[in-house]
Image (tube, rainbow, N blue to C red):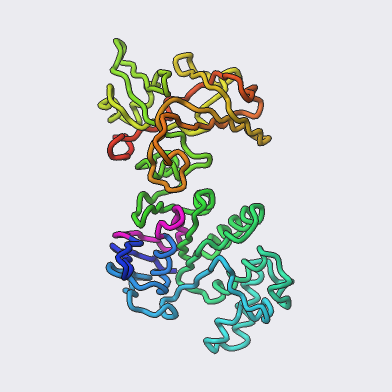
Amino acid sequence: MAEIVLDHIEKVYPNGFRAVHDLSLEVREGEFLVLVGPSGCGKSTALRMVAGLEEITSGELRIGGRLVNDTPPKDRDIAMVFQNYALYPHMTVFDNIGFALKLRKVPKDEIDRRVREAAKILELEENLDRKPGQLSGGQRQRVAMGRAIVRQPAAFLMDEPLSNLDAKLRVQMRAEIARIQRNLGVTTLYVTHDQVEAMTMGDRVAVLQAGVLQQVDAPQTLYDHPVNLFVAAFIGSPSMNLFESELSEPDADGGITVAFGSQPVALDPAIFESRPQLRSYAGRRVIAGVRPEDVDDITLDGSGLPPEQHVRAEIELVEALGSEIMAHFTIDAAAAQTGDPDAIDDVGASEQTKCVARLDPHSSVRLGETATLGVHTARMHFFDIDTGEGIWD
């Protein structure tokens, strides 16, 4: 095992395009760290610089404490798993897994031992005599991982290894990869654009946007405590509902309301304990955010939300998923500009924001009807309208 340290790493191409900007990141020994972000954010470029497949413009890269900026890929003691598997179709599974060892002139009995150990870990023992064309997508991905495992590297680098699999197989394989990594304890840097993958697999998750590191932390911390609008919008599925709003001046009892479109909603006093700085924004415009699961159908028992935290919403779409209902509605407030190029609400200047509520499957909301929804304002998120930074301490 070895830690990977990126110290103020930059990647600038000859045409002047800056793909990675001042990236400082540490992947600890034995850690599974996921680098996530939208397409074109620089995450694969960063991984390729660690692998030695892209030249580093400036900064220092260390693997196991050794400076490797100019070290050839084969001498960095890393193993890389790609999204396209890159298997030799004419070779058996056994030969594919052991090929790198054969090139290194490892003794045959040692190759046999390592390949069979890897096959046992990956549950490929019955497939060692087959060729890649006779395997499923998940099995081929296991073979690609087997090639990495037998090398016994200091670190694994994985570049969107599940993107070519169907949805069901992706779920199975992400659990498998996480299990294998934890059993082996090998330092792993994993790149994906899928934030669900990132949240379920990583010990920590680093969010990248336009080549700039936005936040790195434990998955739940990213979800509960996003540092800016981009992280808030990117982490979570469905995304956080984000819209321009205004906080009222305190009333006689010190209470403050937030504008949910044209409807004022009382802020739960508990929010000022987790966000003490929020009181200084009274009377000012902010970006307000609410997770879909923090909106309830108040006709069901258990919401416990007082009338001053209710809003009326016309239901425009109902998605019944069995375990939950996604209710879509629109509020008369401008959508927040999150900086995510894939966000629909970031396109154009609109004074309306499309929102979604994740409701109990027994909710009675109906398409085209006006429903009364409760907002858990103690769990709302707030961001400075000028900087996009989260309003916390």
Give x and y (percent) for residue 6. 33, 64
Q: Is residue 144 above or below residue 363?
A: below
Residue 192 among those drawn in magenta = no
Q: Which residues are magenta?
A: 21-42
Residue 40 among those drawn in magenta = yes
Q: In the orientation shown, which residue stands out farthest toward the left? A: 280
Question: Is there any visible trace of residue 392 in the rendered image?
Answer: no
Give x and y (percent) for residue 52. 40, 74
Give the number of callouts. 0
Question: Is there any visible trace of residue 98 in the rendered image?
Answer: yes
Q: Is residue 303 above or below residue 124?
A: above
Quadrant hosting residue 13: bottom left
Q: Nearer the viewer, residue 155 or 93?
A: 93
Quadrant hosting residue 49: bottom left
Q: Quadrant of the N terminus?
A: bottom left
Q: Is residue 363 above or below residue 42?
A: above
Horizontal side of 247 relative to 199 (left or right) equals: left
Q: Residue at x 61, y 77 (%)?
A: 97
Q: Nearer the viewer, residue 369 or 280?
A: 369
Give x and y (percent) for residue 364. 65, 22
Q: Residue at x 60, y 80 (%)?
A: 98
Horizontal side of 276 relative to 45 (left or right) equals: left
Quadrant hosting residue 346: top left
Q: Is residue 354 above or below residue 147?
A: above
Give x and y (percent) for residue 197. 53, 52
